[in-house]
Image (cartoon, helix red, strand yellow):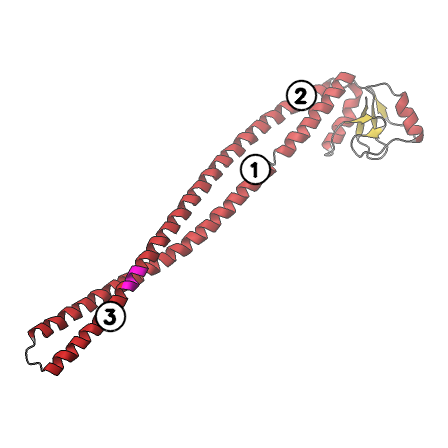
Amino acid sequence: MALTTWTADPAAAAELIAHLRESRRETHRRAQTELVAELTELAARHRELAVRSGELTTALEDKHRQQRETAARTADQQSKISAMEARLNAGEGMTSRDLVALQGDIDSAKAALAKLEDAELELLESIEELQGDVAGLKQESAGIAAQGKEKQALRKQVEAEIATRLAELETATAQDLAHMGPAADPVRADLDAGGPGLMPCDAGACGNCGDALAGADLAEFKALQPGTVFSCPDCEVPLLRQ
């Protein structure tokens, strides 16, 4: 079967291929895959930090509660010791045995007080450590938020640049097609169908599907003048004889 061919302006056809190629590249770049992946990763990390910060904040509040309770128990124990020491010092109506027993109670109360004070100190140290951890998470979260904002701004900037360039390429493509002559019709039809529009054919290999012409098709291809547009026998995409 003979190749279906159309006459085209070689320069306009070559320019059209270049503009269509760049349009495909810009359209692919428009997805900004790498930048979107970075933003997705930052968002995930920000959520992780928020969860961890919430957990630490809850733990911090619990430590504060324990510290307040321990401080109250410590103050109460100190009051009890003071009262017992006052009774011991007064010694009114007390026998020697009573005084010895009271002194024992005071010693036991002071030992309990020391444990309470140690517990409160440990709680204060835990609180300080947790406060540092929460502050660190907040700082990291703020840094990630700033990075995200910066990358979002970059994404919008790139999107605007790509949109501008695609509009320019659309105008250039329309101008190329206007100078293409009869070959413009199959190119437009392929573009409307979602195809590449026009692809180069070098040494008899389709620039779209990659299949090589053979037999009578190859012989006819070799006889075509450079700048001729023909339909690929396999994928039917318009090809430019270069």
N-terminal of the two: label 2 or label 3?
3
Q: Which mark is residue 172?
A: 2
The secondary structure type at the circle numbered 1 is helix
Q: Quadrant of the N terminus?
A: top right
Front-lying residue, 210 or 187:
210
CA distance separating discs 2 and 3:
91 Å
N-terminal of the two: label 1 or label 3?
1
Residue at image position (42%, 56%) is: 55
Asked if residue 232 is among those painted magenta in the image, a careful observer would answer no
Front-lying residue, 207 or 147:
147
Residue 79: quadrant of the picture: bottom left
Please state the horizontal and vertical placement of residue 153, each as a whole percent of the image. 49, 33
Visible in this render: residue 13?
A: yes
Please state the horizontal and vertical placement of residue 15, each as a whole percent of the image. 72, 20
The secondary structure type at the circle numbered 2 is helix
Residue span colored magenta: 118-122
Q: Which residue is mark 3?
A: 111
Residue at image position (30%, 64%) is: 119
Judge left or right: residue 107 versus residue 227. Answer: left
Residue at image position (42%, 48%) is: 137
Q: Which residue is mark 1?
A: 35
The three-letter code of the residue at mark 3 reads Ala
By secondary structure, the bulk of the magenta-drawn segment is best described as helix
Residue 217: quadrant of the picture: top right
Judge left or right: residue 79 versus residue 200. Answer: left
